[in-house]
Amino acid sequence: MNRSRKTGKGLPRRVYLKHGAYFFVPAEPMLDPKDGKIKRWIPLAKADEGEAAMLLALGNLIQDAAISSESMKYVCAEFKKHKLHRYTEETKATYGRYLDAIAEAFADFTARQVTTKSWAQFLRDNFSDKPNTAQKYTALARKLFKFVISELGLREDNPIDQIELDDYETERRLILPTHEQVQAIRQAGMTSKVRSDTGKSLPTASGPMFACLVDAAYLLWARAIDVRELKEAQIDGGLGGFIRVTPSKTIKSSGKSVDIRITAPIWEVIERARAIKKEYKVHGKPLITGYLFPTQKGTAYSKSGLFSMWDRARDRLGIGKDSPPEERIQYRDLRALGATDAAKAGKKMEEIQARLTHTSSKTSEIYIKEVIAEVSEMDLPLPWTTK
């Protein structure tokens, strides 16, 4: 039951006069058709324009709202509002950008009007040369239309279910860095570019921690996000203890975790990172942080922060966009390098699969970038003379 209004008596329901203007206040924040933003107070007209202008604007708003509540802009905004809270801040930001792009591209569509063909055209127009991005957009769109069906009730079918993605298959990354390449990038991250005035380079403040991040990625075979956000609480004991790693990629699927035994090399990286942290100061006071590899502010390195450090180090070695692919190695290649080196050393596939937290050995084999040849030691003499 609606309570009696105390102000603005005589005005239409949910219309208020405030700050010299008429506003419509919906029961729940809604999309303002004028600018596409979700609002609690939606302006109608200025007070000096009179009630006639307000009533006309209110009628148009109600009519537009009926259409807007089915628009792609509206459903994208609702998905953001109700579904993104489940994801990490990094994923929220990425999905937010994707949803904004979808809302803009389908600005003239209602949710009912989007077809499999129109989505395929969207992919062709925007991602014909970016297969990985096309797949990511499509995966999000499938979730978006499930929301449209189940929670908004705007349609009964999912247009993304029939989308054909054969033209957007990602190629397997075949680049495997050499130890010398990684060592060079690791060292390049320790110093700045050569200064033009002195001809010398200076140590970088972030260099020592960057080296720890490189070493940890190779030793733990963890994804970048799991190395960046590794916390002290995940470390159980010292040398001979364990590090619990629950990959962020699998936490909502298989949920697989792995306890990685702390070997002497891993323990050395942990101690080195802790020693570096002790030197960090915030406002002259010792840094307090739960991250093992923090920034100098105590936060975890962001994805862009870590990758930009890696890219700058490559740049100092003269490796740019025009360099051969085998020289443009990436931070994520360290995971594959560690797994490949283990395979070369004769480690069993079951062990490698467990360390990579894969549910299938076939997936683990993708990370083994070099074919590990079987050894044949048969000693057969020639059955004929050679003279």
Image: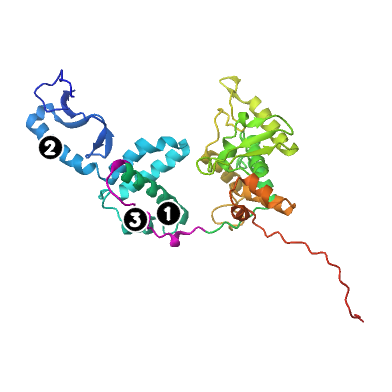
The numbered mark, 2 or 3, whose residue comes first in the sequence reads: 2
Q: Relative to residue 386, is residue 255 drawn left or right?
A: left
Reply above or below: 101 against 129. above
Q: Amino acid at mark 3?
A: Trp
Residue type at numbered disc 1: Ala
Seen from the viewer's position, the closer of residues 205 and 269 is: 269
Horizontal and vertical percent for residue 178?
A: 68, 53
Q: What residue is disc 1 on?
A: 134
**Rendered image: mark on residue 119:** 3
- Secondary structure of the residue carrying tag 2 is helix
Check if mark 1's residue and mark 2's residue have beta carbons within 8 Å. no
**Residue that carries the numbered disc 2 in the rendered image:** 59
Q: Is residue 26 magenta?
A: no
- Which label's residue is closer to the chain start, 1 or 2? 2
User: Which percent across, then down, holds residue 277?
Assistant: 64, 28
Residue depicted at 57% across the width and 46% down the height: 311
Q: What is the crowding at mark 2: few (fewer than 14 residues within 10 Å), some, or many (at least 20)?
A: few
Q: What residue sits 10% from the left and 30% below the top?
A: 49
What is the x, y in percent for residue 332? 59, 47
| Region in magenta | 151-170
Amino acid carrying label 2: it is: Gly
Taking the view exactly as shown, the residue that stands out farthest to the top is 6
Residue lying at 82% horizontally and 64% vertically, measured from the top left:
377
The answer to whether residue 179 of the structure is visible from this angle is yes
Q: Quadrant of residue 383?
A: bottom right
Relative placement, left or right, of 44 versus 134 is left
